[in-house]
Amino acid sequence: MSSYLTQRSINTGLKMTDQRLIVLQVIDQADDHPSVDTIHRRARELDSSISVATVYRTLKFLDEMNLVRRHKFNEKQARFETNIDHHHHMIGVADGDVLEFQDNELEALIEAITDRLGYELFDHNLELYGRKAQSGTS
């Protein structure tokens, strides 16, 4: 079974090994924004011979080819995602949860601010940091 990420990696020149296939599978199946250590741990559950160097090299290639996005989220370790469509992030400072969101009203406001300042917007990135509200509060 060949995933979209695997096929794109092959098409862009990544030499495919069994270990890299597993790393790609782990990244492709992640529903969170895993770090290198998390990807390595998950890959080793499938093949104990996978080294952290293989994970780093694979992620470096994927990042250079724009097949994954690398984020820091005010953390020491980078975290990765395969969703390269435009979206923003809400990061829970207490639990480390990362929620993706897209909001058309926000996009319109960003465009309006950009126009008012006399710029042509070509890219932007928004990361919101907060704590989950207590039940009964908004």
Image: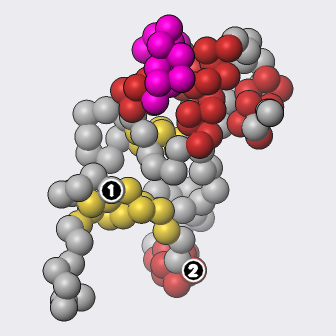
Q: Is residue 63 above or below residue 88?
A: above
Q: Which residues make up the magenta segment?
A: 42-56
Give the percent coordinates (x, y) of residue 85.
64, 56
Give the percent coordinates (x, y) of residue 95.
23, 55
Q: Are the residues flagged by discs 2 and 1 in contact, CB closer than 8 Å?
A: no
Q: Which residue does the image show at 71% across and 36% down from the upper left?
A: 5
Q: Which residue does the image show at 53% across and 44% down from the upper left?
A: 30
The extreme bottom residue here reads 136
Q: Which residue does the image show at 77% across and 40% down from the upper left?
A: 4
Q: Nearer the viewer, residue 59 or 66?
A: 59
* Mark toward the start of the polypeptide (2 vs 1): 1
Q: Nearer the viewer, residue 26 or 72?
A: 26
Kindly tell me whether residue 8 is visible in this rendering. Answer: no
For label 1, the residue is 97
Q: Is residue 135 above or below residue 8?
A: below
Give the percent coordinates (x, y) of residue 101.
49, 68
What coloring was used for the rendering? secondary structure
Q: Residues within 10 Å of mark 1 (few under 14, many from 20)?
A: some
Amino acid at pointer 2: Asn
Whole-angstrom CA distance, mark 2 to mark 1, is 23 Å
Quarter of the image that includes the C terminus: bottom left
Lateral position of residue 48 relative to residue 5, left or right = left
Q: Is residue 41 above or below residue 122?
A: above
Which label sits on residue 104?
2
Lateral position of residue 67 relative to residue 124, left or right = right
